[in-house]
Image (tube, rainbow, N blue to C red):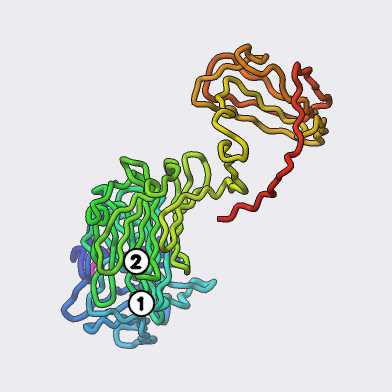
Amino acid sequence: MSNVPPPSSGLGSNSNYFLNDSCNNLEGVATTIDVSTDIVASAGFGFQLNAYSPNNETCAIQQYVIAVDTGGQMTCIVNNWQNASTALINNWVALYELPSATLPSGHQCRIELQNDSAGNVTAATFTVRALGVAPAKGSAFDAYWGSDNSQHINFIGTDGHVHELYIHPGASWANNDLTQMAGAVPPAPGTALDGYWGSDSSQHVNFIGTDGQVHELYIHPGANWVDNPLTQMAGAVAPAPGTALDGYWGSDSSQHLNFIGKDDGHVHELYIHPGAGWVDNPLTQMAGAVAPAPGTALDGYWGNDSSQHVNFIGTDGHVHELYIHPGAGWVDNDLTDVVLASVTQTLSAISGVSSADLSPIVAFELDIVGYDNGQSTTLSSASGTITYTAANAMTVVNAEPSCCEFDGGTVESANTAYGELPTGSSDTFVQTFNKSSTVIKAAKHNGLIKTRANTFMRSSPLLR
């Protein structure tokens, strides 16, 4: 499709194309000006929408203007004329005050006309806005509140930079390009984000850079944003691709940033306190903990008792807490499976037991039955699994092996049923069990009937 030839005076200044609809009334007219390069003028400038009325109208020409003067004051103007010397409307209203006479790139000015049912222009809306960079698809988000009642929302923009949406009392929202302001390494695609406010009014925004390092965008009162390559500063292991990030501030003004290491798969803490430098603590190693599952989320926080808590999903599928309090070391708490009690009986420590009473085992079975005195118990409900493990490769047999010293077994019974187990050898077998409508009472050559010991200690709840 060919272009419309330019006006006889050319395309520029006060000579531009006209837009029309075969002289039909135009309705809903709007012009939007997006500024991609700063507009700087010697004597101010304006965006003029010059609208022409049809024949035989008292108002012959209508001007709707957004003007910028030499001081940066933006004014919206309605200046409508009967003829070249007679103004019907000349109304100037302050719109917005810029910091200077420059209209920066990234701003948008819009003039939008409203009409009545006859097509007459009845109102004009003048809008100026600062266009922020939109968030990239799938961008992480993180937000925090400042002690000065400021708000901060961080995201990755479509320009590949870390951005901060920022507002403080008495002001409007601003879009700060933190990567540009700090001269920082760009964030890696898909990076996590984590930010927090310090009690010294400092700000900290953490991300993974395209250089594969953990970075901190940092600012404190009276200074500018800077980029700290934390893993480099701490001599730390590199972060795993796609690792979660989580950071927090301690009441002792310490900083803690957690991530998953690339080569060792551990949960790591980048740590600093006043008067010291950044260090790398491999928390799962220090706590002797279960390894974190690939892609696990991370969450950490500081307690008012100066304890620290870092939570993650382990390779066992459980929620784990890495926990420390003043004067202690890191420990791993399995929060999914809570140990209610655990008692170890050392046989040789039991009264009357000597080393001659100890021996190895060559076979075993597990029975779910009554617990003493030859009792037969009735289960009204029961099902689950039994997992058998050993350091050896075991095989399943259906009778007591001849190598066993004792020929016999328990005579207690119950209405339980067990699932079948496979042939072959393994160090692990899993068997189902449930309740049955019948009770099997296997004949035992030598029946064992347990009786309650004379000394019996009631167990105490397990306390953390």
* SS at circle 1: strand
Query: Where residue 275 appears, x then y in whole percent?
Result: 25, 68
Residue 64 is labelled as 1
Label whose residue precedes the other's in the sequence (2 or 1): 1
Q: Could one spot residue 397 in this view of the protein?
A: yes
Residue 441 location (% of width, % of height): 80, 22
- Residue 376, how many percent across, how many down? 82, 30
Quadrant of res 150? bottom left
Which residue corresponds to the image point at 80% horizontal and 22% vertical from the top-left? 440
Foreground of the two, 83 or 177: 177
The answer to whether residue 449 is above or below residue 237 is: above
Return the residue nearer the eye: 90 or 104. Answer: 104
Q: Which mark is residue 157?
A: none
| Amino acid type assigned to the residue bearing label 2 in the image | Ser
Disc 2 crowd, CA 10 A, few/some/many (<14, 14-19, 20+): some
How much space separates mark 2 and mark 1, taking CA atoms? 57 Å
What residue is shown at x 36% (from left), y 42% (from top)?
265
Magenta extent: 14-18
Q: Quadrant of the C terminus?
A: bottom right
Please check the rendered image and state whether residue 15 is part of the magenta-colored stretch, yes or no. Answer: yes
Q: Residue at x 40, y 47 (%)?
A: 284
Q: Considering only vertical position in the picture, is 135 above or below 390?
A: below
Q: Relative to 6, does residue 369 appear above or below in the rendering?
A: above
Q: Quadrant of residue 21?
A: bottom left
Q: Nearer the viewer, residue 87 or 122?
A: 122
Which labelled disc corresponds to residue 254? 2
Q: Is residue 134 visible?
A: no
